[in-house]
Image (cartoon, rainbow, N blue to C red):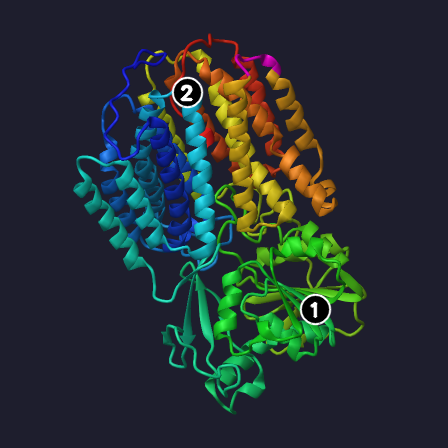
């Protein structure tokens, strides 16, 4: 069998699955599942990677593409996949978990940047690329065995089912160990034939490394790897597998130290002084932390209705109850933190009849609720991860913006107040940004108190006449913050001191970009020419459009894992629909397809997010299902029609690959220019595609894969 470029199709290995279509479906399912598994696991093993999860996605995609480019060279890399996977996981296992610092971005528990740490970070992404090259090689071989668009349909179908299966796996009982067992089993089914024992040995080593990483009693939430240990007076800690009987009523109950991705996150215990005996270590510890949670009630005494967003283990909720609150809405995005608190927390606040627990994104809750509160408390959210593998925005990015604080201010009663607490440490510039943000949102300068690390800001509808200058270790700050950027929905980067891309991001992006260019140009088949520039710009536009769509819709519905999963599934369905239309109804390419694409892009760009946010739920759902993904459908029509008729599909694929990789990197420009401006770059990419699409002939049969399967 030969394709349009007259290359001999490599022989297909013996497999337990009959037919190249079914094999392609299974391999796409395998690749997507492994990609999501590594994106979920690696940030927990190396906390630095939690800030780079989107580059895990891009490097996975790059590996698949490079593998497909060399699929005709008979290298037979697919049989080496288990060994490469074992080496990759072993490398992650031995890497340090130190966190390099950044010149313009605050990261919790960060260490001074070193060359070694940066080198290890780059190595993680290079190894991730190598893991996916053998899978891409096999997928590319299977594309040669089918008509291009039918192969693409099998590929998309496998990716879609892999996303659905992994979403269910994450929801019901996520475990990297069992996830890798499933990946290994599927690989052995697909690769049935010679070398099974060799493959099984390599996969067993990978699984063994994973089994050594998990700590006993650890929990996997949709966002974090969570461990908890009992705090002891001598500074030691033990696993809280079995909290003592009567923990909610006993005197001198234990307090548990909760970590996420191996870093301190929050305590789970009671602050009630009646629960401790005089002079006890636990009572002294509780008294030392009580002031920071009681401060809002000293300045704003007697609130009856309180909302706590970022409730975590329940410390802020208990403070509200101990200060006389009659109703508390406790909003927490992570269901596992709520479940853990219910199991080990001596306060038992989440089972108190005065408390209503809401598992949701804080921003989404504030937008949807019709309640009015005497006090809204922003707890110590302090996220330590990105909200999605397809975005560089933190999990709490859309909570700490001017628009978010303004929405909260509108939910107050006439005498209500907002209390925003943050563990700022010695980052004075971060405190300044918080003050400027609250002042811009409410129209008045907040009352600000400094503690020993934390800071609390209070903003009132009707400011009180007498405000204490100090409370315990807290001192009031009366100065004026200097001018500087403030986080907004368009630039949701509280943790950055200025607009720009942090140095370590640039280092990793630059390394992967050089790797991408050198590898693609080195592997590009002969015959590639000027005509392939069109596919380059199609790749730039698509991946940037996809990542921007996820960020936008997460603003509309909350930055929860479910929203992100649904959007990714919707994108895959839209691309699959476009491929179906081209396969069965659209026989040839027409330049007129760019008209609806550019119009839909312009509409999405011009309609302000505030207008969509003001719509009821039905309107926001309709816009997100019909308006936002519509450009993806039209882009899919253009790609499929031109790819089907490309005279040199391997060259077209390579150009599209490097374009898509650069499109993923361009998403980081949002840190400098804002996310709205990224829409102009998307439109520019498709305009450039329009200019170059007519520069070369497009006839013949195509083979290969499209990066749209990401």
Identify the residue position indicated by label 2 in the image: 148
Residue at 37% x, 28% y: name it: 21
Quadrant of image for the N terminus: top left
Seen as rendered, the residue at the extreme bottom is 278
Q: CA distance from mark 1 to mark 2?
A: 59 Å
The image quarter containing residue 705 is top left
589 in magenta: yes
The image quarter containing residue 450 is bottom right
Q: Is residue 643 above or below residue 446?
A: above
Seen as rendered, the residue at the extreme front is 18
> Number of callouts in the render?
2
Image coordinates of residue 52 in percent, x first then y, are: 44, 45
Q: Is residue 10 left or right of residue 484?
A: left
> Which residue is more in the foreground, 557 or 491?
557
Identify the residue position indicated by label 1 in the image: 306
Image coordinates of residue 540 in percent, x first then y, are: 50, 27
Q: Is residue 205 left or right of residue 617?
A: left
Labels 1 & 2 near each other (Cβ < 8 A):
no
Residue at 37% x, 38% y: name it: 31
Q: Is residue 658 visible?
A: no
Q: Please state the extent of the stretch shown in magenta in the rendering.
A: 586-592
């Amino acid at each position: 069998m030969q394709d349009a470029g007259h290359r001999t199709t490599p022989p297909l290995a013996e497999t337990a699955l009959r037919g190249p279509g079914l094999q392609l479906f299974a391999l796409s399912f395998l690749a997507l599942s492994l990609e999501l598994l590594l994106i979920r696991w690696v940030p927990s093993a190396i906390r630095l990677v939690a800030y780079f999860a989107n580059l895990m996605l891009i490097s996975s995609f790059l590996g698949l593409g490079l593998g497909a480019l060399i699929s005709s060279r008979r290298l037979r890399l697919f049989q080496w996949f288990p060994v490469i996977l074992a080496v990759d996981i072993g490398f992650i296992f031995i890497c340090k978990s130190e966190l390099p610092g950044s010149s313009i971005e605050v990261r919790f528990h960060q260490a001074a940047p070193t060359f070694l740490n940066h080198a290890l970070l780059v190595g993680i992404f290079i190894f991730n690329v190598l893991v996916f090259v053998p899978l891409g090689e096999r997928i590319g071989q299977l594309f040669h065995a089918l008509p291009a668009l039918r192969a693409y349909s099998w590929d998309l179908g496998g990716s879609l089912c892999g996303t659905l299966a992994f979403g269910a796996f994450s929801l019901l009982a996520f475990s990297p160990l069992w996830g890798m067992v499933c990946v290994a089993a599927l690989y052995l089914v697909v690769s049935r034939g010679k070398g099974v024992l060799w493959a099984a040995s390599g996969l067993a080593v990978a699984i063994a490394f994973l089994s050594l990483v998990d700590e006993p009693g650890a929990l996997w939430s949709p966002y974090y790897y969570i461990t908890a240990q009992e705090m002891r007076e001598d500074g030691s800690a033990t696993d809280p597998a079995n909290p003592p009987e009567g923990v909610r009523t006993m005197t001198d109950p234990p307090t548990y130290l909760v970590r996420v991705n191996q870093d301190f996150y929050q305590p789970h215990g009671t602050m009630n002084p009646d629960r401790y005996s005089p002079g006890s270590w636990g009572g002294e510890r509780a008294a030392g932390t009580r002031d920071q949670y009681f401060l809002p009630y000293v300045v704003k005494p007697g609130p009856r209705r309180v909302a706590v967003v970022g409730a975590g283990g329940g410390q802020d909720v208990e403070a509200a109850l101990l200060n006389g609150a009659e109703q508390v809405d406790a909003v927490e995005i992570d269901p596992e933190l709520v479940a853990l608190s219910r199991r080990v927390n001596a306060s038992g606040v989440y089972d108190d009849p005065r408390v209503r627990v809401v598992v949701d994104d804080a921003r989404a809750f504030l937008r949807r609720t019709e309640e009015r509160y005497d006090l809204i408390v922003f707890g110590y959210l302090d996220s330590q991860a990105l909200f999605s593998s397809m975005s560089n925005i933190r999990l709490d990015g859309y909570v700490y913006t001017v628009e978010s604080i303004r929405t909260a201010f509108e939910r107050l009663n006439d005498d209500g107040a907002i209390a925003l607490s943050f563990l700022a440490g010695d980052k004075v510039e971060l405190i300044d940004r918080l003050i400027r943000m609250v002042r811009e949102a409410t129209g008045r300068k907040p009352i600000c108190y400094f503690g020993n690390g934390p800071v609390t800001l209070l903003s009132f509808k009707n400011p009180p006449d007498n405000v204490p200058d100090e409370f315990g270790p807290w001192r009031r700050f009366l100065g004026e913050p200097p001018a500087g950027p403030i986080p907004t929905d368009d630039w949701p980067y509280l943790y950055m001191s200025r607009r720009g891309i942090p140095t370590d991001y640039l280092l990793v992006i630059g390394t992967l970009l050089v790797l991408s260019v050198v590898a693609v140009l080195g592997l590009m088949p002969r015959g590639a020419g000027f005509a392939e520039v069109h596919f380059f710009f199609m790749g730039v536009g698509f991946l940037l459009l996809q990542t921007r769509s996820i960020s936008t819709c997460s603003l509309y519905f909350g930055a929860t894992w479910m929203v992100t999963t649904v959007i990714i599934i919707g994108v895959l369905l839209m691309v699959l629909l476009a491929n179906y239309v081209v396969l069965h109804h659209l026989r040839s390419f027409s330049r007129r397809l760019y008209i609806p694409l550019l119009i839909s892009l312009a509409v999405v760009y011009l309609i302000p997010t505030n207008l969509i946010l003001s719509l009821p739920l039905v309107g926001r759902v309709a816009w997100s299902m019909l308006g936002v993904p519509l450009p993806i459908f039209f882009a899919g029509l253009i790609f499929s029609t031109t790819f089907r008729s490309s005279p040199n599909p391997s060259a077209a694929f390579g150009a599209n690959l490097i374009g898509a990789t650069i499109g993923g990197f361009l998403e980081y420009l949002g840190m400098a220019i804002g996310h709205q401006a990224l829409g102009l770059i998307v439109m520019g990419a498709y305009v450039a595609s329009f200019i170059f699409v007519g520069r070369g002939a497009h006839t013949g049969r195509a083979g290969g894969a499209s990066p749209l399967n990401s």
